[in-house]
Amino acid sequence: MKKILLLVNLAVFLFVVQINAQTVTVSGDISTNTTWLSNTTYLLSGFVYVTNNAELTIQPGTIIKGDKASKGSLIITRGSKIFADGTPSQPIVFTSNEPAGSRTYGDWGGLVICGNAPINDPAGEKVIEGGVDPVKGLYGGSNSSDNSGILRYVRIEFPGIAFMPNNEINGLTMGGVGSGTTIDYIQVSYSGDDSYESFGGNVNLKHLIAYRGLDDDFDTDYGFSGRCQFLVSLRDSNVADISGSNGFESDNDATGSLNTPTTHPIYSNVTEIGPMVNAGTQINSNFKRGAHIRRSAKTSIYNSVIAGYPTGLLVDGTNCESNANNDELQFRNNVLAGCTTPLAVASGSTFDITTWFNMPVFANSILPNTSDLNLTDAYNYDSPDFIPLNNSPLLTGADFTANNLLDPFFEDVTYRGAFGTTDWTTSWTNFDCQNTDYTTGIKENEAVESAILFPNPIDASSQLSFELANASTIDLNILNISGKVVSSTVYTNLSAGHHRVLITEKSIAAGIYTLQIKSAFGTSVRKLIVR
C-alpha cells in the first residue's frame, strides 16, 4: 500500500489562521533600524521614508496597507535598506486599505527604492518621480554593486499614482538600484501606472508578475542595465492608459540622448499576454505595443513570447535602428503571436525590420493566433495558468549562446517564455486580491502544533487536524511536481475552532507532491512523499 509521509517531523502540519493583533499607522521618517511584525498590520499614511542608512526588516506574512486619502507610500532612500524576505507560504503583502470589493487602481502610492548605482543623467543623480521630497528622493551614484536589501515573495496590490504626466509612482519603482540588491518572486497587481519601472541602476530581476496593470508592464530608462529572467504579464483587455500601454517600454532617457551608461536591459524568458485573446477581441484603444524600444535604447530580448498586442515589436527611431544593425539591440529566439501588426518602425523609416527580424541566426518566429501557443489557460483573469501544453512550440527553442546571456545569473533552460512544466506562481500569488479579506491572514505558528495527522504515516483513514480562528471554506489540494492539482477536496463553511478531516488518497502515483491548504485568508503548503 502506498504511504504518504508529511515532511514536518514526519507528522505535524502547522496550520493556524490568526487575527492580526493590531494596526499601527506609520508616517514620516524611519531613521533607525526597525522591524515590522507579522502579527501587526501597518498602515502607510502619506510618504513614509526610510532614511539615515536605516534598515527596515519586514517579517514573512506581514500585511502593509496604503492609506488612500494621503497617498500612502514607502520610499527607501539612498543608503537605507529594506529586507522584505517572505516565503511561498507567507508572502509579504502591500495592499490597499480600502475594503474588499471597493479596491481599485492607484488606491495608494507604491514601493520606491532609491540606490547609489549609476544613471546616465549628466548630474549623476536625479529626484525620483512621483512628487517625493527633492532631497530624500534622490537616486543615482557610482556604486554599481550597491545593496538596497531584499524583496522576495512580495505582493504589491492596487498601487500606482500619476501625480501628473511623466511624474508617477509605479507599483515597484527602482531608481539607481544596484546589483547587490535581491528582487525575486514579486507580483504587482492593478497598478495605476507602470507595474515596474527601473530608472538607471543594474539590479537583476527574476520571477516578476505584472497583473492587469494600467500603463506599461516593464519600463526601463536612464541607463538601466540589469538582467531579467522569468517575467510574466497579463493584461485586462478593457483597461489601458491614455499615454499608451505597452508590455516593454524602453528609453535611454526622456530626450533620446546618447548619454551613458546606455539603457540596455537584458531580458530572457518573458511571457507577455496582451489584451487580445483573438482577432475579434474588443480592446481598449489605448493599448499599443508588446515591446516599444525607442529613444536610443539598446534593449535586448531573448527566448520570450509576446502575444495579443495591436503591434508586437516597434523599433522606434534612427538610433535604435542603428543599434539593431550594429547588433547592440538584439531580439532572438522569440515568438510573436496573435499581433495585428507583428513588426513596425517609426513613420518614414526605411529600416527593413522584417529582414532583420527574420535573419535565420536570430531564430525568431511569428504565429497568427495566440491560441497557436497552446498555453493551458493564460487568459483566465481569475486563475491564469501560463504553463505550455505538451504540443506547445514554447517548450523548445531557447538558446543561451548570445554573449549577453553568458552571465551565471541566467538559468539555461530549454523553453521559451517564463514557464516550462513548473508553475513558479503556485502558493504565494493572489489573482483575486479584490475580494481578499486582509483583516486576517494565515500565519504559521511554530509554537503551537495544532494540526496533526492521525495515524502516521497517512493511510486511507488518516485525518488532518487543524484549528481555525475564523469561519472559512478550506480547499485541500495535492499538487504534483509540475504544480498541477491531482486531488482536490473542498470543505465548506467550516466554523471557527478545531476540525478533523479524512485524507483518502489511494489513486495517486508514488512521487513527490505538495499538500496545499487554501482559505479566503491565504495559502499554506507542505511537501509530501508518496511511496
Image: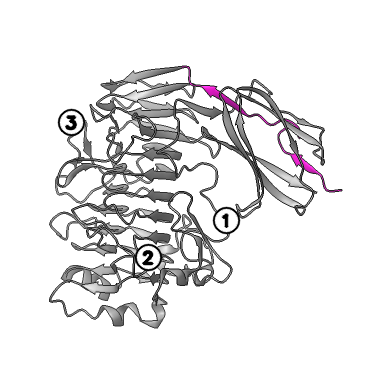
Q: Disc 2 designates what residue?
A: 306
| Image side of residue 461 versus residue 58, left or right | right
Q: Sequence-wise, which precedes: disc 1 or disc 2? A: 2
Residue 29 location, x and y as percent? Answer: 27, 22
Question: What residue do we see at 39% from left, 55% from top?
Answer: 234
Which secondary structure, mark 2?
A: strand
The residue sitting at the front extreme is 493
Which secondary structure, mark 1?
A: loop
In the image, residue 3 lies in the stretch drawn in magenta: yes
**Does the image show residue 204?**
no
Q: Disc 1 designates what residue?
A: 422
Q: Sequence-wise, which precedes: disc 2 or disc 3? A: 3
Q: Amino acid at mark 1?
A: Thr
For the residues labelled 1 and 3, the Cα–Cα distance comes to 43 Å
In the image, residue 101 lies in the stretch drawn in magenta: no
Question: What residue do we see at 35% from left, 81% from top?
Answer: 358
**Vertical order, 437 against 115 (above or below):** above
Question: What residue do we see at 38% from left, 23% from top?
Answer: 42
**Residue 458 or 229: which is nearer the viewer?**
458
| Image side of residue 209 versus residue 133, left or right | right
Which secondary structure, mark 3?
A: loop
- In which quadrant of the rendered view does residue 275 lie? bottom left
| Image side of residue 186 versus residue 166, left or right | right
Q: Are marks 2 and 3 in contact (CB under 8 Å)?
A: no
Residue 5 location, x and y as percent? Answer: 77, 40
Highlighted magenta segment, given as a residue range: 1-21
Q: Disc 3 designates what residue?
A: 133
Residue 168 location, x and y as percent? Answer: 21, 42
**Does the image show residue 510?**
yes
